[in-house]
């Protein structure tokens, strides 16, 4: 995602958040039933759009950096299943543990059957 797309996402998101917030604030400040929320939504949408356009790139870059560092740390802490350590321990569920669990006497020739 390039910088232009990040600014556009921030602009749209900021506009929506600004419009909703502006409508709620203006409904309290200007208690005229339709006029207050509409005026607040217009002003909030314009302000939110500009703020979102300027901050959108920074927020998206920060979120991407956080996700990358989180996943890197997660990969270091949690080893992947199926490696040499998992195959050495049959109770770990590794790739070499191919014997399925069968309850005792489930159709085997050596099971005890009632006479």
Image (tube, grey):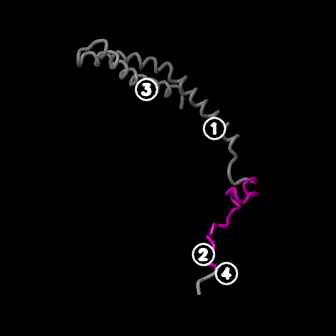
Q: Residue furthest bottom?
A: 115
101 or 73: nearer the viewer: 101
Q: Which residue is mark 3?
A: 13
Label 2 crowding class (10 Å Cα cut-off): few <14, some 14-19, many 20+? Answer: few
Q: Does the stretch in magenta take in 19?
A: no
Q: Measure the C-alpha gap from mark 2 to mark 1.
A: 44 Å
- At 29% from the left and 18% from the top, the residue drawn is 37
Q: Which residue is mark 1?
A: 71
Q: Measure the C-alpha gap from mark 3 to mark 4.
A: 69 Å
Label 1 crowding class (10 Å Cα cut-off): few <14, some 14-19, many 20+? Answer: few
Q: Secondary structure at mark 3?
A: helix
- The majority secondary structure of the magenta stretch comes to loop
| Labels 1 and 4 touching (C-beta < 8 A) | no
Query: Seen in the image, is 62 located left or right of residue 9?
Result: right
The x, y position of residue 88, in whole percent, is: 76, 57
- At 35% from the left and 16% from the top, the residue drawn is 25
Which of discs 3 and 1 lies nearer the camera? The answer is 1
């Amino acid at each position: 995602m390039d910088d232009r797309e990040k600014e556009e996402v921030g602009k749209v998101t900021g506009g929506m958040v600004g419009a909703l917030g502006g409508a709620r604030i203006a409904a309290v400040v200007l208690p005229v039933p339709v006029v207050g929320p509409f005026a607040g939504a217009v002003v909030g949408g314009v302000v939110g759009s500009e703020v979102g356009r300027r901050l959108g790139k920074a927020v998206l870059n920060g979120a991407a950096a956080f996700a990358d560092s989180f996943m890197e740390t997660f990969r270091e802490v949690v080893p992947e299943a199926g490696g040499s350590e998992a195959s050495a321990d049959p109770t770990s569920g590794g790739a070499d543990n191919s014997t399925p669990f069968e309850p005792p006497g489930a159709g085997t020739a050596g099971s005890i059957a009632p006479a």
